[in-house]
Amino acid sequence: MPARAQVAQPGSVSAPPALPPIPPRPRPLGESRHDLASFATDADDVECYDREEEPYTAVVDTHFHPRPFGGPAIPMPELVDYFDRLGVRFVVYMGIGQVLELDSGCTYYLDCLGTAAIPSVKNDFYNGADLAAYRPKKVLIVPSMTFMDLAHPAEIVERIAFYDREFPGMFRWAGELNVIKQALLGNLHEPAGLNDIDDWAPFMRLLRDRNIPVTLHSDLGNDANPTQYLYLMEHVLERYPDNKIVWAHMGLSKELTRMDADEHVATMKRLLDEYPNLMLDISWDVIYNAYRPDGQKFIDFFNEYPARILPGSDFVAAGTKEFATYENELDITSRVLRLLTDEAFRNIALGQNFFRLTGIDYTAPQICR
């Protein structure tokens, strides 16, 4: 296999089938009784979490984009108000690493095919400056480095050192980083090949030494070939088994909406069993929209692996959006959580997996019996 040509371009993929309308909200979300302080490890007399009355939506959003691909963003004080109103107490701030050309006037990459969306430090710096200027009290925000170009990793360690100088100790996560994202191929996205992945070694060692998780977007495949790109993630996991790797969206995407649920779950189980440091992120409403007819299979899977799943909305905070948009996306991506066992709900929705992964000194409340 040639050194730089391992990633085949997807063939023509037929349009996904029309999906039935999204069912109405199962019940009102409810009002949270748990503020940030109630998650502190040393908090006294913390009341249990009442799943019948409090929100079924996650209190931790490990996949949130406070900056869009282009154009203005929702201001941070407004976002913090969104989080507080919905009981979201912990957020991984992912910027967006692939910024559209500034003079393009584009907000969303699929509206501007042919316009380059190239990895950049711009959004990370916006986020760092916002967090330095506005220190929220009602939510704990973990900023993430999203600038990394995985197809050209040579300068990543040097740029992390630059972040260390500009924002010492601030960035405690990496990603969402694109290994292969078919939706971006029309915007000059260059997927990482096998040799590129081998060349990640210096920055992956740095992340490992600092206990920094990394969220990777790596499409499993497409409807024409559901596992076309699985070999890329398998190579990442084989090459870096000691890194804390979060696989975004369980490898699913808008290009892959017809994969057999049993095959998908079996693939995820195999990799989770083989690589103890792998976590799966269940962000993005595409999972619910396309795979809800097979929902029970995923519910059973999450209940069987309650310590290996992270929740997230995948909300992109473009300035044209409002509170109701985030509320809806948080709801859709959390609907599966209301059907989990108490153990899985506490680990996933209430953040125990997130606390364990990051090592931050918080703990999830117990579930009311």
Image: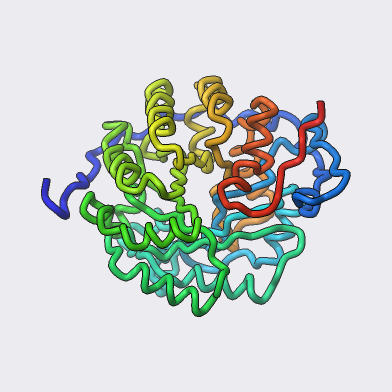
The quadrant holding residue 266 is top left
Number of numbered discs: 0
Q: Which residue is rendered at x = 49% and y = 68% of the image?
A: 123
Where 345 sits versus 320, above or below? above
Of residues 109 and 121, the one drawn nearer to the viewer in this rendering: 121
Q: Is residue 43 above or below residue 57?
A: below
Question: Image check: 38 left or right of 293?
Answer: right
The answer to whether 122 is drawn above or below residue 4 in the figure is: below
Where does the image place residue 77, in percent across and percent down from the top left? 71, 66
Residue at image point 55% right, 74% down: 168
Can residue 308 be seen by looking at this rendering? Answer: yes
Quadrant for residue 275, please give it: top left
In percent of width and height, residue 62 lies at 57, 49
What residue is at 16 percent from the left and 51 percent from the top? 5
Quadrant, the N terminus: top left
- Where is residue 216? Give x, y as percent: 41, 49
Residue 133, position as x, y percentages in the image: 67, 76
Q: As rendered, which of 226 and 317 lies closer to the eye?
A: 226
Q: Is residue 117 visible?
A: no
Residue 229 sits in which quadrant? top left
Tell me what residue is drawn at x 69 percent, y 72 percent: 134
Question: Residue lying farthest left?
Answer: 2
